[in-house]
Image: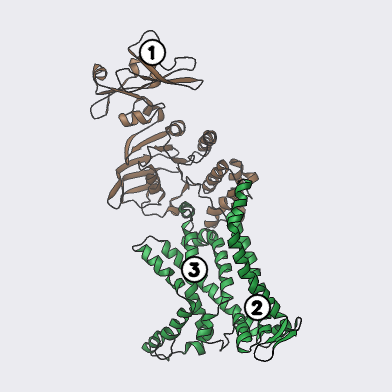
Amino acid sequence: MATQHSRSVARLMMAPAVVLLLGWMLVPLTMTLYFSFKKYLPLRGGDLGWVGFDNYIRFVSSSSFWPAVQATLVIVGGVLVITVVLGILLAMLLDQPMWGQGVVRILVIAPFFVMPTVSALVWKNMFMDPVNGLLAHLWRFFGAEPISWLSEASMTSIIMIVSWQWLPFATLILLTAIQSLDSEQLEAAEMDGAPVLKRFYHIILPHLSRAITIVILIQTIFLLSIFAEIFVTTGGAFGTRTLTYLIFQRVLESQNVGLGSAGGVYAIILANIVAIFLMRIVGKNLDA
Amino acid sequence: MGRIQLKSVTKSFGDVQVIPPLDLTIEDGEFTVFVGPSGCGKSTLLRLIAGLEDITSGSIDIDGADATDVPPAKRGLAMVFQSYALYPHMTVRKNIAFPLRMAKLDQAEIDKRVEGAASVLNLTDYLDRRPGQLSGGQRQRVAIGRAIVREPAAFLFDEPLSNLDAALRVGMRLEISELHERLATTMIYVTHDQVEAMTMADKIVVLQAGVIEQVGSPLELYRTPRNLFVAGFIGSPKMNFIEGEEAAKYGAQTIGIRPEHITVSDTEGDWSGVVSVSEHLGSDTFFHVHETGLADTITVRADGEVGFRHGDRVHLTPRADVIHRFDAKGLRIG
């Protein structure tokens, strides 16, 4: 489609961006790989030489590894279920013509613009505080004993906070998908005798399937690395230590850079597996 | 059975009344075509009959029973949409079977009916494909298949051929006419193409701005258009309208003469003018004649072998027995 000349110009134009991105990625990646094969304890002797795959074995065989994997899966799974289900419902609601549509849509997207640290702090202090939180007031209003959310229902709390942040993203993607549905298809299904729920199940849901897959994969990549929400709320206590948080603790709290780097390499592999699926699906979407 | 009766039906969107009170009866087994320029309310009328839009006032009877408040699925009508509205994630088989599955028929019956419809429509080889893998004409047939398996009281077609190319359109037109002969079910067909209307219809309903201008068989409309609008809309090329002195000779405000009812000669005739464009179709030739002193352009249809060119002076003679006369309000005289 393009001439030889315009192709080489295009390559030249893109080169600075590609070089910058590549450097940005390669330097930390190489350093992580380098440290992961070393025994490196900055406060206890520094670089103590090469240790082969010791760090990798120690990271996996540690007693906190499997609970961390479990916590990660519960958070990622919980947030995905909540955001996808509520996202579909909200998207269908926002698709209806109504007064003030533009404003409502911006309001729905708003949580996505709040920094994770800030939103976690807002939730922690404004809603979930067992004494002054709004939820505590609500509980007391109905005569119930307020829950100290972050210690008694720590996992639920974190899932709630993260879902609140990611719901706008899911809603937005699903809303654009719903808007591309041909209304004649729904009318045809109506004429064919499909009641509302069957129209949803047979027409709308299949139409959304690709958008749902994309939401799930993109969110998975980002949810695997949530950190701020845990750091400012539970600090990894009460069973909320995820893989990411475990790596952080190994590097900064135990001051064991080698061990943490090995964990980091595991995380890179995991994220890339998800990314490969994502690229294939998004790529297929672009072809069609 | 499929007798549909509209009784003083109106439809308003907000303050805008798109269909003023309208009465119409469509007899059982009739092929009725709603035709009119775009925005004349013909699709809206079809959607009112289908139940996809609520009527503002009046009533709709189907087979003698009031269907005004009956939901679309229960009216026993099947619709073929302009965009075909096939379900893209289902195979052709599942598309056609969808209404039957919704009606909870048993699988053996569904298979039998789907196979039946597929063989009628030459779709047997495509049953396991998806709509995206089919051509426009095949998609159209799937949409029709989905309608016929339901064995509806009437079929509603909303400009079904407008997305097809010209050659395919002629073919599908024939197929739909044949289908009507075979099924003998009531069909209501919306189009803006008067050729489709003329060739397919038992009864044509000409609409303009939501108002029925005339109802009749294709030849009735062709021979005795009730007013200027119908006269100009039915027939191709369009009827020539002449006003002024020439019309007064016939005791009318406007006279209309169809291009095929004018003979053209290079020696003698009632009117004369200069050929501006001649369109040679092989079988026919259309001349657009200017400078007649009667109207901007007079269109004449002549035999394909008549060979006048741009700039030639020609003489025209209308056939006196087929001159249409209209009064000051545009209504037909006599």
The correct choice, above or below, for B304 with respect to A123 in the image is above
Same chain shared by disc 2 and disc 3: yes
In the rendered image of the structure, the colour used to display chain A is green
Q: Nearer the viewer, residue A78 or A38?
A: A38
Q: State the image quarter where residue B28 is shown.
A: top left
Name which residue lies at 61% across and 55% down: A11
Kindly report which numbered mark, 2 or 1, lies closer to the viewer in this rendering: 2
Q: In this view, does A27 lie to the left or right of A140?
A: right
Residue B139 x %, y %: 56, 45
Identified by mark 2, the residue type is Gly
Residue at the spot of label 1: B314
Distance between the alpha carbons at the discs numbered 2 and 1: 92 Å
Distance between the alpha carbons at the discs numbered 2 and 3: 26 Å
- Give the residue at the far top of this rendering: B267
Residue A108 x %, y %: 42, 69
In the rendered image of the structure, the colour used to display chain B is brown
The correct choice, above or below, for A45 with respect to A7 in the image is below
Residue B79 x %, y %: 47, 47
For the C terminus of chain B, the quadrant is: top left
Identified by mark 3, the residue type is Phe
Residue A92 x %, y %: 45, 63
Residue at the spot of label 2: A264
Task: Pinpoint the chain carrying mark 2.
Answer: A
Identified by mark 1, the residue type is Val
For the N terminus of chain B, the quadrant is: top left
Q: In this view, does B293 lie to the left or right of B75?
A: left
For the residues labelled 2 and 3, say whether their Cβ atoms are less than 8 Å apart. no
The correct choice, above or below, for A167 with respect to A126 in the image is above
Name which residue lies at 70% across and 77% down: A34
**At numbered mark 3, what does the secondary structure look like: helix, strand or loop?**
helix
Task: Pinpoint the chain carrying mark 3.
Answer: A
Residue at the spot of label 3: A169
